[in-house]
Amino acid sequence: MTNRSIRVGTFFSGIGSPEKALQKLKEDEIIDDYEIVFFSEIDENAIKSYCAIHDVDKNLNLGDITKIKGIKLPYCDIWIGGFPCQDISSAGRMIGFSYESKTRSSLGWEIIRLLKEINEKPKCVIFENVANITNKKYENTLIAFKEELSKLGYKLYDSVLNASDYGIPQNRKRYFLVALKDNNKFVFPEKRNSNISLIDYIDNKVEEKYYLTDSEFSEQNGKFIFVNKNNKNIQYEIDPLLIKKGGVCGKDLHTKYMQSSRIFSIYGNMPTLTANNTADNCKIVVESEESR
Ligand SMILES: C[S@@+](CC[C@H](N)C(=O)[O-])C[C@H]1O[C@@H](n2cnc3c(N)ncnc32)[C@H](O)[C@@H]1O
């Protein structure tokens, strides 16, 4: 797809990360250009962010996917839909995404409905979701989903990719299903090693309010104990020997769940940030510049 603008439409658009990827492909001169033909999102804040990030008018938003009529959709080369994951994710109740379930995750089937309704189907449709969609529990639903796409004339390629294998310092595994028309072939990109870690992404100058602790600490059995600046009951235990290794190097002694207690080193990768974990969210140890 070169020498012209790729027409793209996204559903469940959020803040438009696939659109950001297209922007990067354009900057890197891998594609000539792309045009956001429409997006579909219902969350007011996401819509505002989307329009600001991609510099598009909110009129491009088609809103609730269940209300869209396929027959009225303008032609696009690519559709992309990272459909809701709440009912698939291991962090949720795992009710699933079968068509009959009527869960939020079952909204992914709306894209298939639109493909059935539209006159000229896109050449490529990309679906994205959490890696847990490949869990045995959802096997039949995923097979049925793929069968519907095959019946519509698409050749399918799917894989679970981890962002950390593609130069992003975050362990974030995601399932991608690429559907291509006209027997076009697709190969997922090779994993590549990169030495990028959090320290390459984190700002050097961070506003004081984002720091949880002062530089003062006490030492117990070789571990450093820091106290939260605003709440003395919250303490953080850091193992100095683990900092340079990257990964988990300490714990928040206050949190209930092990996963949210983890404190990460700037010399490694981030975990996947959970959407509902605001109070206990990810903490990172930042050494003073002299000790780096
Ligand atoms: C997993 S997020 C997708 C994130 C997106 N890929 C991004 O790059 O930000 C799912 C999105 O679907 C949106 N959504 C949920 N129900 C919807 C509906 N009926 N119609 C359109 N969007 C919907 C949610 O508001 C949420 O932003």
Image (cartoon, rainbow, N blue to C red):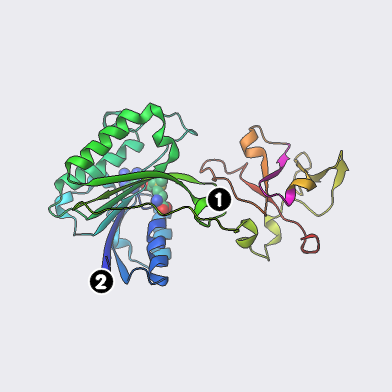
Left/right of residue 175 with respect to residue 271 in the rendered view: left
Residue 224 picture quarter: top right
Where residue 211 appears, as percent x and y from the top left, is 71, 54
Residue at x 39%, y 27% (from the top left corner) = 137
**Mark identifier at residue 282:** none
SS at mark 2 in the image: loop
- Residue at position x 15%, y 50% in the image: 118
Q: Quadrant of residue 85?
A: top left
Q: As displayed, is residue 161 above or below residue 49?
A: above
In the rendered image of this protein, does residue 32 appear above or below residue 255? below
x, y (%) of residue 151? Answer: 17, 40
Apparent side of residue 263 relative to residue 164 in the rendered image (left or right): right
Q: Is 28 inside the magenta-drawn segment?
A: no
Total number of numbered discs in the rendering? 2
Location of residue 11 with respect to 274 vertically, above or below: below
Residue 245 painted magenta: yes
Disc 1 residue type (three-letter):
Gln
Q: Considering the image in quadrants, where does the N terminus appear?
A: bottom left
What's drawn in magenta, residue-wise? 243-253
Q: Nearer the viewer, residue 42 or 143?
A: 143
Residue that badge 2 annotates? 4
Characterize the local packing of mark 2: few (<14), some (14-19) or many (20 or more) Cα atoms within 10 angstroms: few
Residue wearing tag 1: 170
- Seen from this angle, which residue lies furthest left? 119
Residue displayed at 14% across by 55% down: 120
